[in-house]
Structure formats: structure tokens, C-alpha cells
Image (tube, helix red, strand yellow):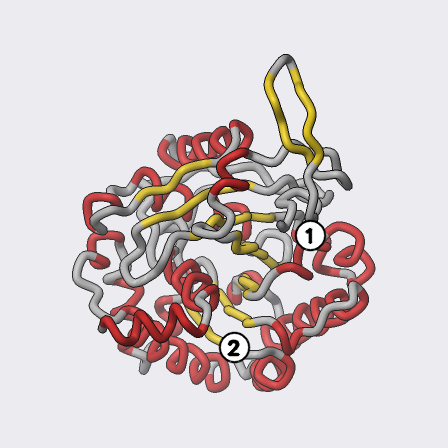
Amino acid sequence: MLCPFCLTNQKNLQNIERDGIPKLLCPKCKEAIPSRYIADYKTCPPVVVSVVGFRGHGKTVYCASLFYAMRRSGLASIWPGFFTTALNEESLDTVIANSSMLEKGELPPSTVKNFPRPTLLQIYGIPGYPPRTLLFYDTAGEVFERASAISRYAGFIMRAHTVLFLVSIRDLENPAPEMARLLNTYIIGLEELGGNPSMQNLVVVLTQADRWLAAIEGFPKIREHLVRGSIAHLANSGNYVQTLQAISSELRYFLLTKVNAHEFVHAAEKFFKSTRFCAVSALGAAPMGHKLQTKVVPKRVLDPLIWLMEYSLTPWQRFLIKLRS
């Protein structure tokens, strides 16, 4: 069993009592493992959500927006049987606090530089996908500036089969070389931890898409996908992965022709098991400082999650889903 706190595999958990209540502890980190995490381990297996990116490029806001979209946007009325449930009090507090801040027009504070506490969230009812336990890890953006900091504060990347690589191209002075540098730093940090990028799927998430819509003249499919990106448009999404694949190809071409990010794209496709591209607007419009000027309207924030779910499928599950469709 994978401990969600220290991310080590443990065969035998430690039985103790705390305040007269039986608990099962990880023998390494001594954290109490949530009982439902243990009970549902096989039917709702864990998926490590590894969020990577520069400081100020929207990692924490994206996670908050995703929590909001899953819990406060009416998604359960669109997808029959859909719901999420936190596995411990700390995770529930995180989800509620982040969702409430966005609802009140406030942005969540920046993440501190340490090995993050995970937010543990089970998710059921995404059309076409079995349930999963999502383990969210988000650490400070400056960690990803240096490979040595990655190995110290972001060891969770080792356990991720899929990496969400967040980039705000409008916040980079020279996007192409800076994107390549961030990717190179990540690869070095992963390899110093003993990992291998060829075992990971890379999902490049272009954040704050509302700020660069004007730059995608000549890319009507991308524009339409983003403009029609509210939660309501997921009601009749059909085979959504096919849509995401088409948008990924368009965004790849956009990065090559408009951003000149050839080195970044080529390195990503060389070193990683697979590379996909998506674009999101976590808020729907740019904030003024730490305050939102309009009601939060997340656009396409579920696209990276769908890629995570897609890559979490076993070959047998993928075969069964294909058979049903």
C-alpha cells in the first residue's frame, strides 16, 4: 500500500489507539492513514496529482479552481452519479477553504516551500472512468527553479505517472527558453531522485488562457474550445478524449509557430512517455491584485483531470471502456 503522506510502499501498517480510537499508522512517517483510503484501496486506487511550474504561474489557483469546479459549480447535476469526498478533516478543510475563497472573490495564498501535505479526495462518476483517490501535492514555485530543491521538497514527483506542467506564457519574458529551462530543471531533479521521465506522461497546461486569447488568431478550434469552456458545456461532451487530442495537436502547433518553443516541445516528446497540451482559465478573467473583479467562471479546468484519469487506466480497463463504447 502506498502511504499518501510519505509516499513509501508499506506492507504492514501499525495498529495503535489514539484517544481510545483505533488507528493504522504508516510505520515510516507515523501518520494515521484514513480508514476509507485503506478500505477502498483496490476499488478506488490512488493517483498522485503532481503539479509543477514556476512561481506565480497559477498552480495553487488552478488547484483551488479545480476544487471549486468539482464541488460548487453544479457538476453533479450534469454528470449522473458524480461526486467527490475528502478522506480526512485536513483535506475537507482545504477543499472548502479554497472553494469559499474563490466564491468570495479572493485568491488563495501562495504555497510555502516545503514537502506539501497532500489533499486526499476520492472522485466518482466521471463519465467513462472508474473511481480514483486523488492525492494532490502542491509546493512553492521556487522549488522548481533548482534541481536540488526539487529533490529536497518535491519528492512526490517520483510517484506520479502523470505530471501537470503549468506554464503561463504571458508571465515569461522570453517564453521559449524559459519553458525549456524549467523542463530541463524538472528532468534533472527527477533523475537525481532516481526517477525516469520516460515512465511519466507529461500534460503541459497553459494557464491564464483568458489573457492570451487575442494571440490565437488563426486557431479557431482553440478559441472555441476555451470560449465554450464552462462546466455547462460538459453535459453532452461525447468522446471527450478525442476532443482533447485534437486540441492538444492545435496547441502543440501554436507553441511551435507562435511561441517558437521548438526546443521545449522536442525535448518533452523525446524524454517523456507521452506529451499532451491543454489550456485553462482557472478564474475566467484576470484578477486585480488578489481580488476577482467578476464571479469566478472556470474554463476547461477539468481537461488536465481528464488526462490524469485517462492515463490512470489499466490496459484491461481501457479495453473494457473501448468495448462498451
In terms of secondary structure, where does tag 2 sit? strand
Q: Given the image, on which type of amino acid does mark 2 rest?
A: Thr
Q: Tell me what residue is drawn at x 68 percent, y 39 percent.
A: 13
The residue that mark 1 highlights is 9
Considering every residue shown, the one lying at the far left of the view is: 236
Q: Tell me what residue is drawn at x 76 percent, y 65 percent.
A: 189
Q: Tell me what residue is drawn at x 29 percent, y 75 percent.
A: 322
Q: Nearer the viewer, residue 90 or 23?
A: 23
Q: Nearer the viewer, residue 317 or 63?
A: 317
Q: Tell me what residue is drawn at x 38 percent, y 72 percent.
A: 318
For the question of whether residue 55 can be seen, the reply is yes
Asked if residue 150 is positioned above or below residue 307 in the image, the reply reads above
Q: Nearer the viewer, residue 322 or 208?
A: 322
For the question of whether residue 222 can be seen, the reply is no
Residue 262: percent from left, percent from top: 57, 86
The disc placed on residue 59 is none
Q: Nearer the viewer, residue 297 or 285?
A: 297
In terms of secondary structure, where does tag 1 sit? loop
The disc placed on residue 275 is 2
Q: Earlier in the sequence, mark 1 or mark 2?
A: 1
* 261 lies left or right of 277: right
